Amino acid sequence: VQLQASGGGLVQAGGSLRLSCAASGNIFGINRMGWYRQAQGKQRELVAIIINSGSTNYATSVKGRFTISRDNAKNTVDLQMNSLKPEDTANYYCNAFSTEYFRDFWGQGTLVTVSS
């Protein structure tokens, strides 16, 4: 499974960005996709995940501001980020869990910088 993320960049506080991640390869075992982030000097943390049924889960810090969505036909997962704050600054990583390989796969990371 290969994951290609895009959409990061620099935005002012209060602005919006949309991240996108495309999965390729042996994708048939994927039952969950999501986004994690890692700020400088901090551990990687969950941002949002979506499972095949459509159920979602969000970090408390992003609830009401971020929305995760998945297009099963295109094998993509997007993260719409609104009302961005400087503390959202981090490298954002796309993630997929495969039941065929029973492991996580990670994209290369895309940097989001929110200026105050």
Image (cartoon, helix red, strand yellow):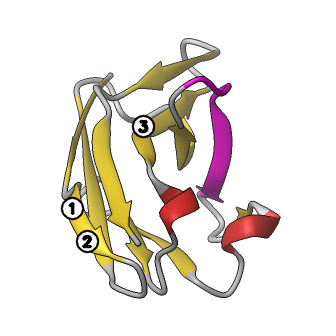
Of pointers 2 and 3, the one earlier in the residue sequence: 2
Circle 1 residue: 10
User: What element does badge 3 sit on?
Assistant: strand
Q: Residue at the spot x=68%, y=38% of the render? A: 45
Disc 1 residue type? Leu
Circles 1 and 2: CB atoms closer than 8 Å: yes
Circle 2 residue: 11
User: What element does badge 2 sit on?
Assistant: strand
Figure check: 11 above or below 97: below
The residue most toward the right is: 60
The answer to whether any part of residue 76 appears in the image is: no
Q: Residue 16 placed where, x, y %? A: 33, 82
User: Which span of residues is magenta-colored?
Assistant: 41-51
Q: How many numbered marks, from 0 up?
A: 3
| The one of 32 and 64 positioned closer to us in this rendering | 64
User: In the image, 9: left or right of 52?
Assistant: left
Q: Residue at the spot x=53%, y=36% of the render? A: 39
Instruction: State the quadrant of the N terminus.
Output: top left
